[in-house]
Amino acid sequence: MELGEISFARMLALGAGYFGLVFAAGFALGTLRVVLLQPRLGPDASRLLELPFMVAISFMAARLIMHRAGAVGRMDALTLGLLAFVLLLLAEILIGGWLFRLPYSALLADAMTPIGFLNLLAQSLLIVFPVLVAGRERIRA
């Protein structure tokens, strides 16, 4: 293993941790959004209001996870972000299907709406945030 490379087990642990932080925050904010904001603003406006908070939380989670990872290369950071993104999508599909009894076609149809697309785009930032943080840390060193 070269300097800065992460073992497979560590990569899984860091990716799962990154996913867990973002998912927990999203679950909490989503609950608050549905209970407090959605009745007053409607579903689309409340989702748009939540979006920048989730992006900021995702970036802070990436900073925390990359700090724990130490000095890593950009490919490892990209892999870590991709793993967290895939776990997040799987969790959304499973929870949407099991907990809320949503058919998978409804989840796909939501992603095709402007608000759904923006949410998916924001979620995809999970992939690049660790790379940005890793590059930023390398510049500081």
Image (cartoon, grey):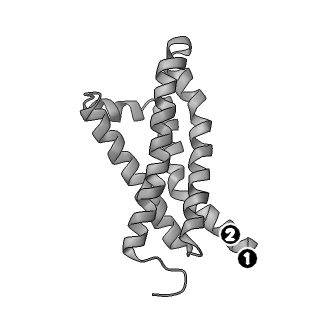
Query: Left of 35 or right of it: where is 86?
Result: left
Q: Among all residues in the image, which is located at the extreme top?
A: 40
Q: Is residue 67 visible?
A: yes
Q: Amino acid at mark 2?
A: Glu
Q: Amino acid at mark 1?
A: Ala
Q: Residue furthest right?
A: 140
Q: Residue at x 63, y 62 (%)?
A: 132
Where residue 99 sits: x, y (%)? 28, 31
Check the picture and name the quadrant holding the N terminus. bottom left
**Residue 141, numbered circle:** 1
Q: Residues within 10 Å of mark 1 (few under 14, many from 20)?
A: few
Position of 69 relative to 115 (above/below):
below
Residue annotated with mark 2: 137
Q: Residue at x 50, y 41 (%)?
A: 25
The answer, for residue 104, to whether it is visible in the render is no
Task: Determine the secondary structure under disc 2.
Answer: helix
Question: In the picture, residue 107 is in which quadrant?
Answer: top left
Whether residues under marks 1 and 2 lie with C-beta atoms below 8 angstroms apart, the answer is yes
54 lies above or below 81? above
Residue drawn 58% across the image and 73% down it? 70
Looking at the image, which residue is at 52% across and 67% down? 77
Q: Is residue 6 above or below residue 80?
A: below
Task: Measure the C-alpha gap from mark 1 to mark 2.
Answer: 6 Å
Q: Residues within 10 Å of mark 2 (few under 14, many from 20)?
A: some
Q: Position of residue 119 (x, y in %)?
A: 50, 37
Tell me the quadrant of the picture where the C terminus can be found.
bottom right
Mark 1 element type:
loop
User: Within the image, what quadrant is residue 134 found in?
Assistant: bottom right
Q: Residue 60, image x and y in percent?
A: 61, 51
**Residue 11 x %, y %:** 42, 69
Q: Does residue 27 appear to the left or right of 129 in the view shown?
A: left
